[in-house]
Amino acid sequence: MNGAESLVRSLLASGVDTCFANPGTSEMHFVAALDQVEGMRCILGMAETVVTGAADGYGRMAGKPAATLLHCGPGFANGLANVHNARRANSPMVNIVGDQATYHRPYDAPLTSDTEGLARASSHWVRTSASSTTVGADAAAAVQAANTAPGQIATLILPADTAWNDGGVVAAPLPVPARPRVAPDTLRTIAQVLRRKEPAMLVLYGQALSEAGLAAANRVAHVSGAKLRTPTQVSRMARGRGRVPVDRIPYVIDGAIKALVGIKHVILVGAKPPTGFFAYPGKPSLMAPPDSDTYVLARPEQDAIAALDALADELGAPRLVPIPEAGTKPELLRGKFEPEAFAVTLAALLPENCIVSEDGVTSGRGLFAPTFNAAPMDWLQNTGGAIGHAFPCATGAAIACPERKVVCLQADGAGMYSLQALWTQGREKLDVVNVVFANQIYKILYGELVSVGAKPGRASNELFDLARPELDWVKLAGGMGMEATRVDTLETFADVFKSACGSKGPFLIEFRI
Ligand SMILES: Cc1ncc(C[n+]2csc(CCOP(=O)(O)OP(=O)(O)O)c2C)c(N)n1
């Protein structure tokens, strides 16, 4: 058995059975091994950012890693933005990066690069296989690292000769450490703080945004009066009717600061201290008031659900507490696109148990509160701010959950970074309804320009305008084998969206704004 075959067999033994790929010459033995070994589903992405973004969406929904197959340092570099987003989401991911044969590296052939350096910039775990005999063990270690809470990026670099040489050994899966529990002292300290009934906020992320985590957080809020919030972007959140309605800390810095005004105690549950997306002249970096205190109930890798439930018990909360009412009533509104009205309309249309993959930028900002009363679903967002995430993420989520409808909400400028994902959706016949917010500008950047104290002028107009020439999403989708329709009112959107959700398979709606 050669190293490549031992790699495929070891990945399968460790539970990795899906591989998003864009291979090249140095990966040919891995590809040949995929031909020989049954059981690995291979999905081609026609850009590495599609490959890595799809692996992110898959990891978030499957709760286990997919493998990616990438070509040398430059292939990995092309996928880096969505590896970055996946790292921020704590997604499990195993990247297999082919590279020059060990003995060929000194000759500095064209595709030779600092692959390890590129990998280290964005991975929690990096290893270059030294020989075909260790490749299997390296694969098992990579999967173990990826599965270690809260979910990690593992990158295994495979010099071509370690793949083609004989002597491969299939490795057994390695044990994954359980999530560490929160220390009783921490629980007692935070319970004491909350008993004071001073203004407090729990900031929830990761596991705390699962249905069980939210229910436990709601118990704490019910008994203590603490507010609940998520960071500006969530990796995966159980939302809709029957789920505890928790709003995000707004993106716009003034709104974010306002959301925390008067808070005395910020309690982090799998989250980082709320921080501005960027620094702005004269504005603080941290969103909590300077006289507040910050506590860590659970670090991202700790068992946040158990910690929240134990904290609720410590505070004497009942097991079952009512879910607070919040948000607007979903209804089908009419007229032109306006973020709030779109959100209210979408809330009336989202299919039960769907997955929403959202990178809506300014068009997506107001989506949270109006969709509190939508059908129960999971919501995935771009956690790292590297735009062009929703199309690939939706693609991976649809592979992970073929029985669920995926709704992809993608801003047009951001969508142009990774629109090749539409081709993969078409080829794999994935059940995704893509909605493109076609406002034909980089709208957010006008706001950012003003926020840093500058004024729009000739150059900024030149750099933010996307209408010359116009992007035609119906043609772009059609050119990749996907049916598509253009709408420009909420009522036509509702008709087309309903019909797209009524049948299986990929579809694109261009919403002209
Ligand atoms: C990888 C990456 N490149 C560039 C940016 C900078 N950037 C942030 S938002 C944005 C434009 C977004 O425009 P669009 O997707 O059309 O959404 P809109 O602002 O119109 O709502 C750009 C270029 C980024 N965040 N990430």
Image (cartoon, rainbow, N blue to C red):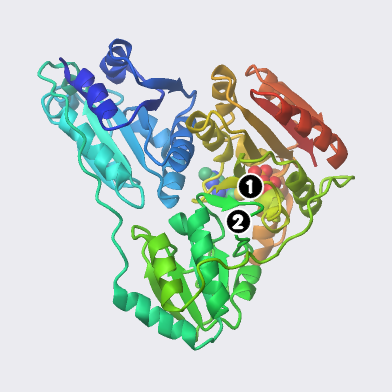
Q: Which of 239 and 380 is in front in this view?
A: 239
Q: Which residue appears farthest toward the right when viewing the image?
A: 335
Q: Which residue is drawn at 78% across and 47% down?
A: 342
Q: Position of residue 96 (x, y in %)?
A: 30, 30
Number of residues whose C-alpha sits closer than 10 Å to that of mark 2, classed few (under 14), some (14–19) or many (20 or more):
many
- Badge 2 marks a residue whose secondary structure is loop
Q: Which residue appears farthest toward the bottom when viewing the image?
A: 196
- Badge 1 marks a residue whose secondary structure is loop
Quadrant (top left, top right, bottom left, bottom right) of the C terminus: top right
Quadrant (top left, top right, bottom left, bottom right) of the N terminus: top left
For residue 510, what is the image quadrant? top right
Q: Nearer the viewer, residue 169 or 465?
A: 169
Q: What residue type is labelled 1?
A: Pro
Does residue 114 appear anywhere in the picture?
Answer: no
Does residue 392 appear anywhere in the picture?
Answer: yes
Q: Residue 376 carries which label?
A: 1
Q: Position of residue 399 (x, y in %)?
A: 50, 29
Q: Which of 462 and 470 is in front in this view?
A: 470
Judged left or right of residue 266, residue 109 is: left
**Do the CB atoms of the residues marked 1 and 2 lie less than 8 Å apart?**
yes
Alpha carbon distance from label 1 to label 2: 7 Å
Number of residues whose C-alpha sits closer than 10 Å to that of mark 1, classed few (under 14), some (14–19) or many (20 or more):
many
Residue under circle 2? 243
Q: Residue at x 37, y 33 (%)?
A: 76
Q: Where is residue 137 in the image (x, y as percent from the top left)?
A: 16, 32
Q: What residue type is labelled 2?
A: Arg
